[in-house]
Amino acid sequence: MSTESYVYVNVEVYSSLPSNAGIGPVVPISVSITVAGSTDITTLNVPAGVDVFVELRGAGGGGSSVDDAIGGAGGGGGAYVLTRIPADIWSLGGDLVVGAAGAAGASGGAEGGDGGDSTLTIDAVLRSSAGGGDGGGMTAESLGGAGGVVVTDGSVELLSEEAGAAGGNGAVNLGGAGGRGGQWGGAGGAGGTDIAPNGVAGFAPGGGGGGSGTSAGTGGAGTVGRAVIWYTPI
């Protein structure tokens, strides 16, 4: 877990809030989590009585590989969601999960791994989720993985959301590109060709590119999800 300055948050996150979001022009405290896994939200030391803004980005799916002339498919991009969590809900405690990157399809023909969902669960109830992108397929059609989708609970205020883009389909001797992540998410990696057989990893949280149409071509891995919380102390 790493902490980022409020200046960075103001540039990237505060600018994404609607004008009536109800916060001041300065967001002095933020925490960004960019490593896959679960975090107990009580360890984030949010003061009692404070509403919390939570941004989630799902992980990208991995690109597939194939064992014939059709290139592997790209993985889907992760979804994006921004919510406001009321103080009384946040105080119930729970877990913030950052989704793991979808694995690359191994050479010789393998589907790409699905990207993990990034989620906020409070009091054993799923409050917000940015879905990870699906891995690229390995069928004869070599279809790209679907992008991640957003799920929210009625107890939180939804401020912004965007599904991830689907990965590209494989073509003759050309892997499909990975899907772009939602809301300024990075574009997925380019698919490999018969000259450069390996898909390229996407940029957070895009999907990995598909492998080339050779038995040696491997898909590219997706990219890990992300979670950012911020609040204004009373």
Image (tube, grey):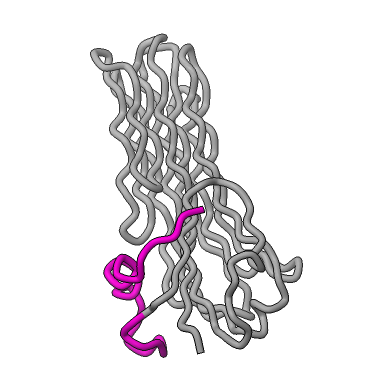
The quarter holding residue 177 reads top left
Residue 47 pos. (x, y %): 59, 80
Determine if the magenta segment contains residue 171.
no
In the image, 221 versus 10, the foreground residue is: 10
Determine if the magenta segment contains residue 15.
yes
Specify the farthest residue to the right: 124
Q: In this picture, which residue range is highlighted in magenta?
A: 1-26
**Left or right for 154, reference 56:** right
Q: Main secondary structure of the magenta part?
A: loop
The quarter holding residue 209 reads top left
Q: Residue at x 50, y 70 (%)?
A: 54
Residue 90 pos. (x, y %): 64, 77
Q: Residue at x 46, y 55 (%)?
A: 2
Specify the farthest residue to the left: 195
Q: Is residue 67 above or below residue 143?
A: above
Q: Is residue 192 above or below residue 160?
A: above
Q: Is residue 112 above or below residue 31?
A: above
**Left or right for 151, reference 222:** right
**Left or right for 189, reference 34:** left
Counting the numbered discs, the total is 0
Q: Residue at x 27, y 14 (%)?
A: 194
In the image, 130 versus 84, the foreground residue is: 84
Q: Residue at x 30, y 45 (%)?
A: 187
Residue 84 pos. (x, y %): 51, 79
**Left or right for 13, reference 118:** left
